[in-house]
Amino acid sequence: MKVKVNQDKCIGCGTCPSLVPEVFDFNDEGLAHVIVDEVQENLEEEVKDAIESCPVGAISEIE
């Protein structure tokens, strides 16, 4: 599984890094970004929760 954060939509609320710090972190602009190339299988459910929890829909799964 691969995911991305749309930097134009992200508001830096902190939901995704708080849910899955192994996958998401903040960049220098205070916006979330993905810090792994591929999500580990054991974290996929947590990442799906982060996708659903994003208040602005900035996180999406990519192929």
Image: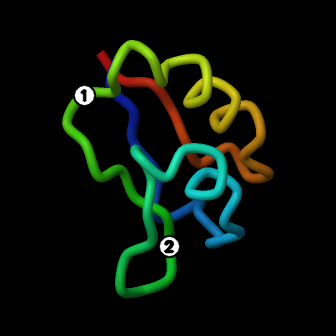
Amino acid bearing label 1: Glu
Q: Residues within 10 Å of mark 1 (few under 14, many from 20)?
A: few
SS assignment at label 1: loop
Do labels 2 and 1 touch, CB within 8 Å?
no
6 vs 16, left or right, is left
Does residue 52 lie above or below 34 as drawn? Answer: above
- In the foreground, 46 or 52: 46
Quadrant hosting residue 48: top right
Mark 2–mark 1 distance (CA, rounded to whole Å): 20 Å
40 vs 32, left or right, is left
Amino acid bearing label 2: Leu
Q: Residues within 10 Å of mark 2 (few under 14, many from 20)?
A: some
Return the residue found at the far front.
42
The numbered mark at residue 27 is none
The residue that disc 1 covers is 38
19 vs 62, left or right, is right
The image position of residue 3, as x and y in percent, is: 39, 33
- For the point 74% across and 31% down, which residue is it? 52
The image position of residue 28, as x and y in percent, is: 36, 86
State which mark lies toward you, 2 or 1: 1
The image position of residue 8, as x and y in percent, is: 50, 64
The residue that disc 2 covers is 31
- For the point 19% across and 36% down, which residue is it? 37
- In the foreground, 45 or 51: 45
The image position of residue 24, as x and y in percent, is: 45, 53
- In the foreground, 63 or 21: 21
Quadrant hosting residue 10: bottom right
- For the point 43% across and 86% down, which residue is it? 29
Does residue 62 lie above or below 26 as drawn? Answer: above
Return the residue found at the far left.
37
- For the point 49% across and 19% down, which residue is it? 44
SS assignment at label 2: loop
